[in-house]
Amino acid sequence: MTDRELDEILTYRWPIVVRRVMADSSDDWVKGFVRSIARHGKRASWRPSLKQAQIMRRLVSELGTAPETSFNPIED
């Protein structure tokens, strides 16, 4: 995973993944994983292992790019 790809995932896509997993998933392992990556991602020197990078990419492709459910904060 390149530095640029990691920055994009952690900055733009990972927060979406975290929100969706915390709201929708009943899998405690996945919840722990996304929290762990969010915590480690705050350190400038941290880089994911090959296995972590593969799981991150899979989660981003499954959860981080799909449109969120319709939510209108302003009532019509």
Image (spheres, rainbow, N blue to C red):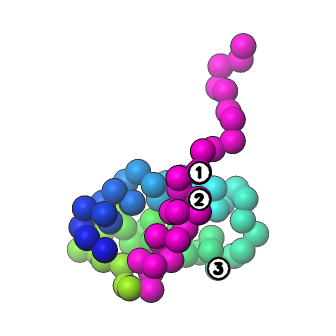
> For this view, does 44 lie left or right of residue 15?
left
**Who's the residue at 53% across and 56% down the image?**
64
Asked if the stretch drawn in magenta spans residue 58, the answer is yes
Q: Pick whichever, 47 or 53, lies toward us.
A: 53
| Mark found first going from the N terminus, 3 or 1 | 3
In the image, taking residue 15 as reference, residue 45 lies left or right, namely left
Classify 10 Å Cα crowding around label 1: few (below 14), some (14-19), many (20 and above).
Answer: few
Tell which of 49 and 58 is nearer to you: 58
Q: Which amino acid is tagged 1?
A: Ala
From the viewer's perspective, tell me whether residue 18 is left or right of residue 25: left
Give how far apart the Cα atoms at labels 3 and 1 are.
22 Å
Q: Residue 66: give its label.
A: 1
Q: Which residue is mark 2?
A: 63
Circle 3 is placed at which residue position? 29
Task: Identify the magenta region.
Answer: 51-76
Q: Earlier in the sequence, mark 3 or mark 2?
A: 3
Please tell me which residue is depicted at 65% across the width and 19% down the height of the picture: 74
> Does any portion of residue 30 appear in the rendered image?
yes
Q: Residue 26: within the magenta?
A: no
Q: What percent of the width, then of the height, locates residue 15?
A: 49, 54
Q: CA distance from mark 2 to mark 1?
A: 6 Å
Q: Nearer the viewer, residue 29 or 54?
A: 54
Q: Secondary structure at mark 1?
A: loop
